[in-house]
Amino acid sequence: MEPTIQNGGTVLVSNLLYLFQNPRIDDIVAVGEAGKVLIKRVTGIHKGNYFLAGDNQQDSLDSRKFGLVAKQNILGKVIYKR
Amino acid sequence: MNISKVFLKLLPEKIAFAHCDIPCGIYDPYVVQRAAHTILRMTQLLAELKSDDQKKMVHDIARMTHVKEEHVNLLEEELDTLRNDYFKEEHFKTYPNLESLFRETLKAASKARQEINMEAAKETLSGAQEIAEIFFKTKNVEPIRVKSVYPTGGEIVLHK
């Protein structure tokens, strides 16, 4: 996700927002995948599932690899980063 | 300490991966091809092995088989890295034979490991070369086959 999020950076993730609304294109979200928490950007929505991609397209492990992600696997929205 | 720092301290912390793979971008099909050439060379040497000295013969067979095993392991590991870390879904869509190419190359390498089998060793090398060609195409450079300088002869795939 460089340059948006730098190595060692801190993000604050809210798990409340998506109780009231669905993730939108361009949201940065935390997602549980392969036993890890990943931070990715929503770049596409298809029949209620989400295509997530890293900003660093060349090397990001993202939906191009693990496919579309269901809403219940999205842990929350990044609402603050530093 | 300001209020936002105190607030952040109160929240549960978890490590998240924004990059996941280290974004080094260093992938190269060269090692796969070198390993395939080594598998072929060891198979050639094992097939041609002749000696009146039985002890030496057993010793040479053990060494060559060991090197062959090592390079099949290396080839498998490198192919896994290319298949799982480098190639993305769009590459597999653009090159629909890529998945079967990986599968067949790994199958041939496994046969080359189990037997002294020149056909399987040649098939392993040929698969490694085809994968290398696709790799370079995905990097938007033109692959070229040049004569290898190895005793196995044959070619190695580089790019212009």
Image (tube, helix red, strand yellow):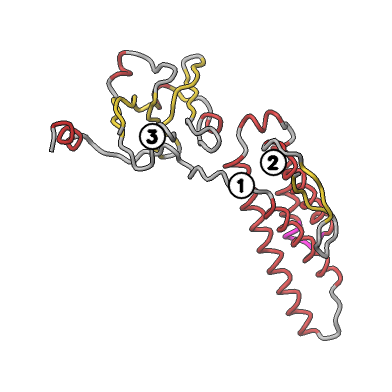
Per the model, the C-alpha gap separating discs 2 and 1 is: 9 Å
The reply to whether residue A26 is visible in this rendering is: yes
The residue drawn where x is 72% and y is 32% is: B95
Left or right placement of residue B154 versus residue B75 in this view: right
Of circles 2 and 3, the one toward us is 3
Q: Quadrant of residue A39?
A: top left
Same chain for the residues under marks 2 and 1 in the image: yes
The residue drawn where x is 30% and y is 25% is: A79
Question: Is the C-beta separation of discs 2 and 1 under 8 Å?
Answer: yes
Q: Is residue B114 magenta?
A: yes
Which chain hosts label 3?
A
The residue drawn where x is 75% and y is 42% is: B133
Residue type (three-letter) at the residue carrying disc 2: Phe
Residue type (three-letter) at the residue carrying disc 3: Ile
Left or right placement of residue B8 versus residue B66 in this view: left
Per the model, the C-alpha gap separating discs 3 and 1 is: 24 Å
Percent position of residue B109, x then y = 73, 54
Numbered range of the magenta stretch: B112-117
Name above or below for residue B149 compared with residue B4. Answer: below
Q: Secondary structure at mark 2?
A: helix
Percent position of residue B143, x then y = 77, 42
Residue type (three-letter) at the residue carrying disc 1: Tyr
According to the picture, the residue beneath numbered tag 1 turns out to be: B27
Per the model, the C-alpha gap separating discs 2 and 3 is: 29 Å
The reply to whether residue B104 is visible in this rendering is: no
Q: Quadrant of residue A38?
A: top left
Left or right placement of residue A28 versus residue B107 in this view: left
Q: Report crowding for label 2: few under 14, some 14 to 19, many 20 or more residues within 10 A (C-alpha).
A: many
Percent position of residue B59, x then y = 73, 80
According to the picture, the residue beneath numbered tag 2 turns out to be: B135
According to the picture, the residue beneath numbered tag 3 turns out to be: A5
